[in-house]
């Protein structure tokens, strides 16, 4: 796996659809390249408390077996531990390439994700954040996302001549909500797709297991725009689903749904508090053999128990991703031999737990990198709030301060 660095730092922020860096037209070379091969790279300016940052265009594989190219962003801390790499999956939740993590980070816009990455950088861990949905922005497509994560790690490990990362670095995953979907699938695919990677742990929060369950939870509510984003994400990956969905969308809503493919999820306010069935000429719009098969294939957990030790945290009152699906999957994985520490948090909801749950997840990650022994077996714990765990309030205070500072000042 080779690379050519363009050492001129990029400060202009073209969106991915307009930026030539993201588009790789040499399909013959792409097909011959090994997964994780770096096709193109550049150093970029990112003001998220990093010494330097790089973007790597790399080869990966979608769920249909097609070779595709997507981008990973590698963040180098000021005092790097070259043997520790965090694979941090930022939330994208969009069917638009212009909402990809590499652009939202590189664009230096205030972001919760950027703020929550900082503790890992402060600890000296390198961070790689992949555009795991691929060039078709296949939101909720499990295999495409998982492969994208694993190949992004391969690319990061191959970038050592410029970034300083050791090729044998220990790796851990982190993801919340849509980021947990990608990390969870990467963990499941690790044995079959990238068994050479030295993965020692992972933390997943608010983990989406079943797409239908999330649809049922958010429909007609504040987060109902996630439904069209997810449907269009899958439609861009599966042509047969795209054809079916647009065959049953009412004529007056056809353009509205096409526009979903070029919009970030928070721009889809017109879908908020709507019953999504209203846009279709049949209320049971997902009751179709094609859709049923695709949704079933993208349900997390059916590939067997992963070997990676996990910390999982989930809100009891999660109004986006039901607790029961993640809990049941964790129980199944535990029975299959996965070492899991699962915390059900009673005081939070989906968005607040992304912040309040992160310090304890960070502590778990730090212990794995420090080589501390794992507890025996599995632990399933109910907590009023994860913020009352030992050392978490202090860490949360620091994280909140640094996060607000990053958001207010963009650095």
Image: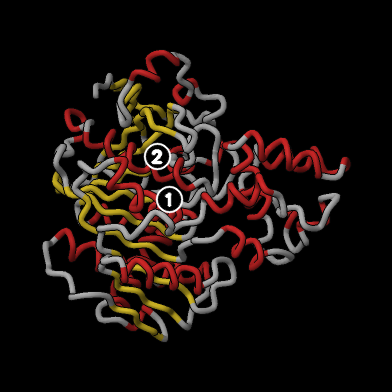
The quarter of the picture where the N terminus appears is top left
Distance (Cα) linking label 2 and label 1: 8 Å
Is residue 205 visible in this depiction of the protein?
yes
**Percent position of residue 317, x then y:** 54, 78
Q: Which mark is residue 148?
A: 2
**Percent position of residue 374, x then y:** 17, 70
In terms of image quadrants, where is residue 377?
bottom left
Q: Is residue 245 left or right of residue 410?
A: right
Instruction: Indicate whether 66 appears above or below 94.
Output: above
**Percent position of residue 119, x then y:** 29, 59
Disc 1 marks which residue? 182
Residue at 46%, 63% in the rendered image? 207
Residue at 37%, 77% in the rendered image? 343
Residue at 31%, 70% in the rendered image? 334
Q: Is residue 49 left or right of residue 171?
A: right
Mark 2 and mark 1 lie on one chain; the one further toward the N terminus is 2
Instruction: Indicate whether 104 appears above or below 188.
Output: above
**Nearer the observer, 373 or 410:** 373
Marks 2 and 1 close (CB-CB < 8 Å) = yes
Is residue 119 visible in this depiction of the protein?
no
Q: Is residue 211 left or right of residue 376?
A: right
Label 1 SS: helix
Q: Residues within 10 Å of mark 1 (few under 14, many from 20)?
A: many
């Amino acid at each position: 796996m080779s690379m050519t660095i363009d050492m001129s730092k990029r400060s202009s922020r073209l969106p991915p659809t307009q930026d030539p860096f993201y588009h790789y037209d040499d399909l013959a070379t792409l097909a011959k390249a090994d997964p994780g091969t770096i096709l193109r790279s550049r150093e970029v300016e990112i003001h998220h408390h990093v010494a330097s940052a790089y973007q790597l265009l790399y080869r990966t594989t979608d769920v249909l077996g097609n070779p595709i190219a997507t981008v990973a962003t590698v963040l180098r801390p000021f005092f790097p531990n070259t043997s520790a790499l965090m694979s941090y999956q930022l939330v994208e939740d969009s069917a638009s390439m212009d909402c990809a993590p590499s652009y939202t980070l590189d664009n230096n816009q205030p972001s919760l994700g950027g703020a929550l990455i900082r503790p890992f950088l402060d600890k000296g861990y390198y961070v790689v954040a992949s555009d795991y949905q691929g060039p078709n922005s296949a939101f909720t497509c499990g295999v495409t996302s998982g492969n994208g994560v694993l190949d992004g790690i391969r690319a990061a490990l191959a970038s050592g001549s410029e970034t300083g990362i050791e090729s044998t670095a220990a790796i851990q995953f982190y993801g919340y909500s849509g980021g947990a979907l990608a990390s969870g699938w990467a963990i499941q695919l690790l044995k079959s797709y990238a068994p050479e990677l030295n993965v020692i742990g992972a933390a997943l929060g608010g983990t989406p297991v079943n797409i239908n369950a999330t649809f049922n939870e958010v429909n007609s509510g504040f987060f109902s725009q996630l439904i069209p984003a997810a449907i269009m994400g899958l439609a861009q990956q599966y042509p047969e689903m795209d054809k079916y969905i647009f065959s049953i969308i009412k004529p007056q809503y056809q353009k509205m749904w096409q526009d979903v493919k070029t919009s970030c999820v928070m721009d889809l306010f017109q879908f908020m508090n709507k019953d999504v069935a209203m846009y279709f000429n049949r209320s049971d719009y997902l009751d179709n053999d094609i859709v049923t098969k695709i949704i079933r294939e993208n349900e997390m957990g059916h590939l067997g128990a992963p070997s990676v030790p996990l910390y999982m945290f989930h809100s009891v009152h999660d109004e986006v991703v039901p607790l029961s699906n993640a809990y049941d999957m964790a129980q199944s994985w535990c029975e299959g031999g996965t070492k899991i520490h699962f915390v059900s948090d009673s005081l939070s909801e989906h968005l607040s737990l992304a912040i309040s749950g992160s310090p304890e997840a960070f502590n778990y990650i730090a212990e794995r990198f420090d080589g501390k022994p794992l507890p025996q077996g599995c632990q399933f714990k109910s907590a009023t709030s994860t913020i009352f765990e030992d050392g978490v309030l202090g860490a949360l205070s620091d994280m909140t301060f640094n996060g607000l500072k990053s958001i207010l000042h963009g650095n």
